Image (tube, rainbow, N blue to C red):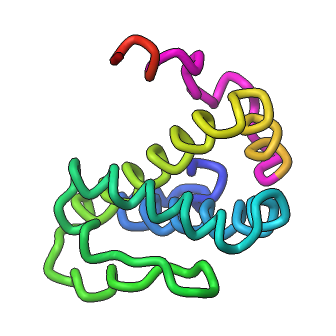
Amino acid sequence: MANETPLGDKSSDVAGQATFQVIDDLRPQLVNLMGMGGFRGLVSRALALGGAEVRWLRAVHVKSDGTLTGFEEHGSLAPGQFAEGKVVLLARLLETLIALIGIGLTLRLVLDTCPKLSLEDLNLGNGEAHEEEK
């Protein structure tokens, strides 16, 4: 997200907008990997998981072209709340992707999409979080 945020502008609203930009940037590669239906399923799952943490995400839906709708109606949210939901959505998307295709391929997709990222910037976990929960 920091790589998508303009220099000098650290407002939570801009960071939140960057989060959806990252999902939009990942879309072509993910659609190529799993098709539009797979991408929509991935994002829908991320929304379901994120909605348990951030209530306003429950109103967001994935359209047939893979774009998101429903978040525009939450203009009454503070910029920090809006950004928080978008960060949670991105985190759940990456978490689900790691569970499906593994950390190696997920890392490769993220680095291909955001080549300015360094490995030190990423904290994708070790992929064993779900095993510990069982």
| Residue at 64% from the left image edge and 65% from the top image edge | 39
* Residue range highlighted in magenta: 113-129
Residue depicted at 33% across the width and 79% down the height:
71
Query: From the viewer's perspective, is residue 38 above or below residue 62?
Result: above
Q: In terms of image quadrants, where is residue 113?
A: bottom right
Point out residue 87 in the picture as x, y percentages from the top left corner.
Answer: 41, 51
What residue sits 26% from the left and 76% below the top? 59
Q: Is residue 57 above or below residue 60?
A: above
**Quadrant where the C terminus lies?**
top left
Number of on-image labels: 0
Viewer-proximal residue, 20 or 80?
20
Question: From this viewpoint, which residue is outermost toward the top?
Answer: 132
Q: Magenta part mainly helix, strand or loop?
A: loop
- Residue closer to the observer: 3 or 39: 39
Residue 77, compared with residue 48, is above or below; it is: below
- Residue 31 in the magenta stretch? The answer is no
* Left or right of residue 77: residue 128: right
The residue under the point 56% across, 51% down is 1
Side of 42 relative to 12 (left or right): right
Whole-percent x, y for residue 128 in the image: 52, 15
Residue 22 x %, y %: 62, 60
Which image quadrant is residue 130 in? Answer: top left
Q: Quadrant of residue 28?
A: bottom right
